[in-house]
Amino acid sequence: MTQHPQPVLCVLLSLALGVCSKLSPFAAQHLELSLNGKWRLSSSNGSLSLPAQVPGCVHSALLQQRYIQDPYFRFNDLSYRWIALDNWTYTTTFTVSSQIRAKQKVLLVFDGVDTVSSISLNGIVVGRTDNMFRRYDLSVRDLLQDGDNLLQVRLLSPVLYALERRNAHSSYRVPPECPPDVQKGECHVNFIRKEQSSFSWDWGPSFPTVGLWKDVRLEVFDVLQLIQLSSLPLYNHSSSQWRLQVELLVDAVPSTSSQVELSLSELDSERTVHTQFLQGRLKYSFTVHINQSSKVDLWWPSGHGSQPFYHLTARVFQDKDLILSSKSKVYFRTVDLIQEPIVGSPGLSFYFCINGKLIFLKGSNWIPADSFQDRVSPAVLRNLLQSSVDANMNALRVWGGGVYEQDLFYSICDELGIMVWQDFMFACAMYPTEDDFIQTVREEVIQQVRRLKSHPSIIIWSGNNENEAALATNWFNIPASQTPTYIKDYVKLYVDNIRTIVQEEDQSRPFLVSSPTNGAESEQEGWVAADPYDPHFGDVHFYSYSLDCWDWRTFPRTRFASEYGFQSWPSFSTLQPISIPEDWSFDSNFTSHRQHHNSGNQQMLQQAALHFNLPNSTDPLKRFKDSIYITQVMQAQCVKTQTEFYRRSRSEIIEGKGHTLGALYWQLNDVWQAPSWSSIEFGGKWKMLHYFAQDFFAPVVSVGFEDDDTLFIYAVSDLSRDLKLRAVVNVYSWSDLDSVCTLTSDQLLVSGGSAAVIFKKPLASLLSRCGRCTRLTCLLSFHLEDDRSFQQGPTNHHFLCSPKDAQGLQRPNITAKVQEDKSGFMVILHSDSVAPFVWLDVEYVPGRFSSNGFLMLSRNKTIRFDAWQPTSIAELSRSLSITTLIDVY
């Protein structure tokens, strides 16, 4: 039986609004018929035929119809390879009214086809697709018929297509051929314009998806269609005046003389222009000068101000009839990337100014939230992005091996004040530069920039992830004699094409060719610097798993750290649903299979063993859970140390290096349940690292470290105002909850947006003042106080020895009581002794604690729990477990 989608017919105000409205009779010429809903899906030989939801993909359809199990269960990423090796056909039928067929133009619109397909209507091929990131508009008016219209999308295996394209490229290889074996992935992903990580990555599975991953519809009109409304606020510093550059992307059937009205009523600013819309699809630009007597409230990053917006109304009239109308939000802000000489340092600065104010970027890197994009719901996006802001982040980098995110992602970032570093979707590879490849990329870039450039949250475009570094440091063993060929291809793709398009389309934000890069210096060196990791320039990616992460000297003192991090395993409650008991061991086939980073499991435990006793319980399940815990402790402490180093380096130059003004750790989220660098597990649960980020990204922080046996404490402030601060240092014995002694520094004026040494004392002198303390028996806790003795920022700690060497550490015997008040749930803790890395877990109850993974230096502590769905005191009490460091010994 043929499945019919549920068509939705609507007279549109505009595509941007997507709502029904009564306009003039002339305006009612623009109709839309949604073809989303239930289609039919079949395999190449017809052996499988099943209902399939659009938007969606083959994997999701097979799962919904129970042809396959959860793709993430155990080894199913390998078991289901066959799905991506087959060709698939989506089929639907729909009827159209005589009213639609009488229109001058009917477009069949696919917002996203994944990826290579042939599209036919009533047996006639009307279009072909080869790019997941493009919208395709196909003219089909003359093919529509009375009764049922048969629409088919025949999709080719992305894996076999990529192989075919690679084989056709015989003149020279375009590396890498395949991912490392440990990733269990597919080859030649750089030859197909789809999500690069869908063929596998070092944190994710190989699920080369196939499907109609975005909306499908008919758009019907007689005169004009508005495809895109975008706006760019631009500020003239010399005249101190804002202007709004408004662009209408219009498809006109006949050439049409019209009147365009643009209005921002809240700012008492408008413009009316008589325009000739020429036949065909063209972009029209207009400028609205903002009334200088109107006060413009600016959009600010989170932590630096609010995120106000204004309403732009665009209306088009023909002979006084309203034929198009659309509204959009407009946010006013400026962004500048400052690369200029620094006194006392070779190289150039690298930092962002928003609205003329230097902003330290604090945050992480975003990867796809699921292997199957149809499962990335608004709730998933909002939870992850709200979790970022709640951990005091103000920036995320949308990494170049995933997807250009859905509109809602950027709208939430606008709303929450999250700055977005937006990569184009090229990562860790060379790419072909044949004309057809370049042409589809050009259309991809044009469409994506036009779609996204109105969002104030996007503060920079970046051409690719790590491809400059791959060329410069020869990741792919390219013979020196052939290097010029690859550099030529690199410049052709990212400079001559992508950069040129971005500069034509968007004058409101900077563009970098790669990340990491030396920025302006890379440009001077012909776009591929001799050392793209040079800390004197640009941004740096840095990873080291063998060096001691507690030693800040191992980290580069860079201008901007855009990637760094350490792996950990997700919680047992995240792993259990997709595994079985025999998998619950660090020696199992499952844990080896799930680890896609070479030697990753060993590296985690080796790094942990530098400072902690590794779990050795004779109970295998307890040892597995304890090992998960110790990897999360290790990861949190490592990233904390590195991030604090970058934050305290913002105001100083040491040996020509410093002025670090960005810290984006790798990575925020997970694509499935597996070990990775993430701070949030698949499903939204916070790892210990994310709780630590709440503190180390706080607006005001104290940072303690040792250098030459001297303890330094820095006060770091992101605030706009100056503060008078002093450091309060409490010395504790590992064996006693009562402070051994307290030391207080003199008060110091700490300027807003700076880092300054506020406490400095030789450790031997400090310990001698506290009588019975040694490095092995004592630890330090410290915080900042202002001139009113109010604490500013979180309390921090400094271990004088590795916890595995601590003398006097006792079992704390922590007890807990769950209570509830009007504001929610709380957990009342009581401890008998010092307890490092106290971890509260409520298993499968979704939510998060106000603090977790903390050092408990008091007998009593209250922690709040924010539940994400209804729960009870009884359920929380039953589910609650508490782990401390000594519990895993």
Image (cartoon, grey):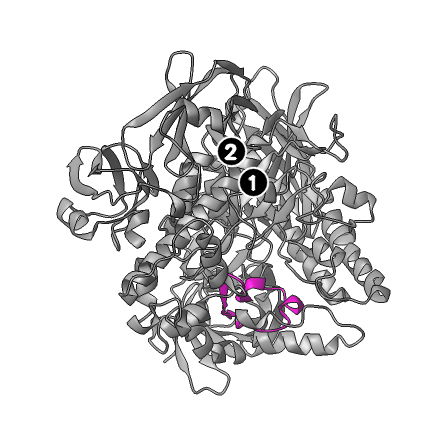
Decide: marks 2, 1 in contact (CB < 8 A)? yes
Tell me what residue is drawn at x 47 percent, y 75 percent. Answer: 91
Q: CA distance from mark 2 to mark 1?
A: 8 Å
Quadrant of image for the N terminus: bottom left
Return the mark for residue 552. 1
- Which range is magenta? 184-213
Q: Quadrant of residue 811?
A: top left
| Neighbours of disc 1 within 10 Å: few (<14), some (14-19), many (20+) | some
* Relative side of 12 to 443, left or right: left
116 and 9: which is toward the camera:
116
* Relative side of 826 to 249, left or right: left
Q: Secondary structure at mark 2?
A: strand
The kind of residue tagged 1 is Trp
| Neighbours of disc 2 within 10 Å: few (<14), some (14-19), many (20+) | many
Return the mark for residue 705. 2
- In reply to whether residue 424 is colored magenta, the answer given is no
Q: How many marks?
A: 2
774 and 731: which is toward the camera:
774
Q: Quadrant of residue 287?
A: top right
The image shows residue 202 at horizontal and vertical percentages of 53, 62
The image shows residue 656 at horizontal and vertical percentages of 72, 33
86 and 567: which is toward the camera:
567
Q: Is residue 886 above or below residue 862?
A: below
112 and 566: which is toward the camera:
566
The kind of residue tagged 2 is Phe
The image shows residue 877 at horizontal and vertical percentages of 16, 48
Q: Secondary structure at mark 1?
A: helix
The furthest residue to the right: 481
Tell me what residue is drawn at x 36 percent, y 58 percent. Answer: 627
Q: Is residue 727 above or below residue 383?
A: above
Q: Is residue 724 above or below residue 809?
A: above
